[in-house]
Image (cartoon, helix red, strand yellow):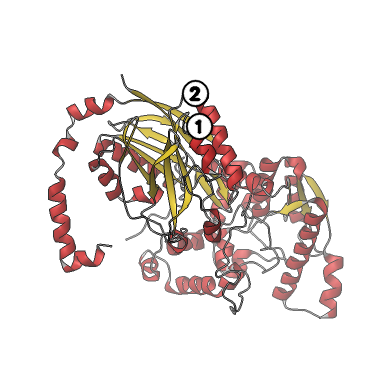
Amino acid sequence: MTTLTLGLAQIKTKLGDIHANLDKHLAYVEEAAKQGVELLVFPELSLTGYVLQDLAPTLAHSPTPDDPIFKPLLDASRRMDLVVGFVDEDERHRFFISAAYLSQGRALHIHHKVYLPTYGLFDEGRFFAWGDSIRAFDTRFGRVGVLICEDFWHASPPYLLWLDGADLMLFASASPGRGLKQEDKLESAWWVEHVNRAYASLFTTFVAHTNRVGFEDGLLFWGGATVFDPNGELLAQGPYFEEALTVAHLDLGQLRRTRARLPLLRDERHALVLREIQRITADERGARDKG
Amino acid sequence: MRPDISLGINTSLARQLLVSFLREEVTRTGLSRAVVGLSGGVDSALSCFLAAEALGSQNVLAVRMPYKTSSSDSLAHAQLIIDQLGVQSETFSITDVVEPLLETISVEDSRRRGNIMARARMIVLYDRSAATNALVIGTGNKTEILLGYTTLFGDSASALNPLGDLYKTQVRQLARAIGVPAPIVDKPPTADLWPGQTDEGEMGLTYERVDQLLYLLVDQRYHPEECMEAGFEKSFVERVLKMIRQNQFKRMPPIIAKLSNRTVGYDFLYLRDWGT
């Protein structure tokens, strides 16, 4: 049986204090190592804090061995694979909300957040550049895809990762809680859990999500990390509102069993999807919306 | 079509979130104490309950600040809270502070007199804040913030406000659930700035009705016409919209004239929690 011991860290961060946040990452690596974790995922912007505003350009780091923040993380990635959230800066000084997948001392993949919410309480598009690619990549546990928060509020990024071969989707968020009603769960938590379960079910794949906790001014991040299996079953869930390391044991053989029963991947007609998208974007109405 | 206007909240979740908010946002500044102006009304009672739960009763200072015309019920109800929670307390009459000023500038207008009293209380609270290394906990609810039923730099002044996103009717729900005594929850809300004053009498509306309208307009983004279709009087909708708009200034820091390339408030943007 092929298994993966997956750790989901839901942490508080200090806003703009990257050294304090690095120390917390390394402490979670120690704890995760004790529990046999092979892949540990941190939330969105886990090294910096979330509402960065004018702090953003001052906190950029590169996931290279000569970077003082990434050096200890790359060293730690020889013990277990890591996904960490940070501000990336390209050679032309554009800043991206980013997640790096670190393994065996190097960065295997960097994802730049593609959808920057700039509405309601969010103002990301004002401070960050939009990422421009959605790619799955190979790891020692199989093919993986990484998305950041608003990326998975849109259906197309998980869909693209699915077509690109991701059998494990890793979602990292800094999701502020909102929507207090009579239910025992905030609306934002309900929504995220709902779509995570839906993606796992629709794509017959593993979907893991981790989310910040703690406050930034009046914004409360709700935590509640989850892992859903290819049947859409909840394998593990972290507590709401508290720091926690949630460990899940993934039986990767479930991918085969589910897809033998339910061959949605086999039957997916993405050439048809492509034709229809081309048609839609070619006509006047579609062209207006194509982005 | 009549919309479903439910202002019901999950009070145990609200309590958990607001207690965490107070605990985390006070202690991350390096402080551990809070000061609350306790009027005897439901808002400040609830803030005091939440602060005591977040920081421990011994770390909360409740200050009663009666004026000579304040109702004796107010003082007694505030004492109920102090006794129930076992918080630290002080009583400071503002009469001797306010009277000379009222006489000197001969103010008869009750609104101006009320504002002076509210600001005198602010001075006391901020002095206690500095004297005891404590943050001032706000008591303003979403209804009064939206309607502007508050004194700028008076009762609206605080370091952090746990109630600002709860409508008055939701404050009552949470207060009941958390154990605020019924006489305090059920009595007519009053700023107690002059004898016989009530919020609802002064504003000419009921909290129950205005909260429903605000919920549609603000939270649910209803168009004013849709609110009228939902059964709200045109004149009521228009008056509430006007109150919201006219009082926007109370919800903002002073506006700064932009001259340079980088100006506080426009393009010098950091959260207050920066670095903590």
Using the rendered view, name the quadrant where residue A255 is placed: top left
* Element assignment for label 1: strand
Labels 1 and 2 positioned on one and the same chain:
yes
Give the residue pinned by disc 1. A245
Residue type at mark 2 is: Gln
* Element assignment for label 2: loop
Residues at badges 1 and 2 in contact (C-beta under 8 Å)?
A: yes
A187 or A9, nearer to the observer = A9
Specify the label residue A35 is tagged with: 2
Q: Which residue is painted at 67% across and 41% down in the image?
A: B53
Using the rendered view, name the quadrant where residue B67 is placed: bottom right
Residue type at mark 1 is: Leu
- Furthest residue to the front? A66
B60 or A209, nearer to the observer = A209
Whichever of callouts 1 and 2 sits on the residue coming sooner in the sequence is 2
B99 relative to B148 in the view: left or right: right
Query: Which subunit holds the residue at mark 2?
Result: A
How far apart in space, not on screen, are marks 1 and 2 (Cα)?
10 Å
Q: Within 10 angstroms of label 1, few (less than 14), some, or many (20 or more) residues?
A: many
Query: Which subunit holds the residue at mark 1?
Result: A
User: Can residue B94 be seen at all in this image of the molecule?
Assistant: yes
